[in-house]
Amino acid sequence: MENQFKKGFYFKAYEGPFQSPFDKLFVIFKELITHTSGDFDEAIDWLRELDKEYQLTDAAYTIDDFIDDLKKKGYIREELKDDGTTGTGITAKTERAIRQAALDQIFGNLKRSGAGNHKTKQAGNGDEHTGEFREFHFGDSLERISLTESLRNAQINNGVESFQLTENDLVVEETQFKAQMSTVLMIDISHSMILYGEDRITPAKKVAMALAELITTRYPKDTLDILVFGNDAWSIAIRDLPYLKVGPYHTNTVAGLQLAMDILRRKRNTNKQIFMITDGKPSCVRERDGSYYMNSNGLDEYIVDKCYNQAQQARKLHIPITTFMIAQDPYLQRFVNQFTEANQGKAFYTGLKGLGEMIFEDYETNRKKRVK
């Protein structure tokens, strides 16, 4: 009888998962609205241009249909602009969708640890079990006693016929502390972030949105504060990230570090850290009389020394600074090396492509250890 079963491989053209016309356009829209810093009209203009070139829509579902669906689903609304005219703006629902998209895009392919808050390496009174056991000691809470292991010991030590459970039979399961981390993310918004034909602010903005979404959803006990620095430094809310733009600013790194440390001084968490994303050299400081001292030519010794002083001050406060330098200039790398040595922190010299992965992995690493 002829064998009816055949072994081998069957190849066919790849068919991606089904997406509705709205879902396909929404993926592109979220990317465009990030690049346009929340400008809906500009994003739609770009989307129409892409539609002309790549035929993203057809007669059954047009860009106008997509805009109508955005309104129905609560992603956009009519709002009053600064000049007094009315226009279309994105809603908080869209802002959340953009942050989630950034998280998936940047961190989606990385290996992650288990769900919940991150563990330290120190065992003690916590609520996450390690799977390791030790003898019961006076003072251990009763709920930490492992009943199964204790009964097992009692049977081995005393036998089944004359069964009894004594203090010597009791064992407890080790647990781990769940460390909490307070992080300040500093983003350089000086003019150099868009110079030389390279958009550096959009990747930095995406990283900030992804990190914000990661912390608020996965580590809700952690805190994340975001500040931007140009001629001065100021805090921004997570909801403001999609609208972040570069200004005609110099780089006042000192002001950013001072504000970051002021924020962290008010946090109760033991573990504190500063992440700084920058591509330029410090070129500005504010004097006590309110005036600005600026110098964009090379590395100004007066400004650089003030940066070193801030790095040392952060070290005294046990606040490590991790610098993500989006530049390859040797003299800037020497500055960052000396800055990092003054703080005993870390520095990464990275292109834009690997920035998100580096920040994610460093955040995870820092959460695994207890910073003292």
Image (cartoon, helix red, strand yellow):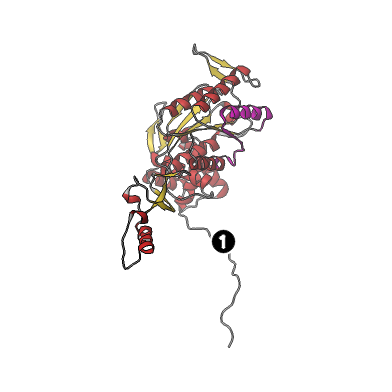
Which residues lie in the magenta part? 328-356
* Outermost residue toward the right in this view: 330
Q: Position of residue 355 (x, y in %)?
A: 57, 39
Q: State which quadrant residue 125 falls in.
A: top left
Residue toward you, 355 or 245 = 355
* Outermost residue toward the top in this view: 289
- Report crowding for label 1: few under 14, some 14 to 19, many 20 or more residues within 10 A (C-alpha): few
Q: Amino acid at mark 1?
A: Tyr
Q: State which quadrant residue 311 falls in.
A: top right
Q: Which residue lies under the disc numbered 1?
A: 14
Quadrant placement of the N terminus: bottom right
Q: Position of residue 325 (x, y in %)?
A: 60, 33
Q: Is residue 109 magenta?
A: no
Vertical comparison of 370 with 332: above or below: below
Helix, strand or loop for disc 1 = loop
Q: State which quadrant residue 13 falls in.
A: bottom right
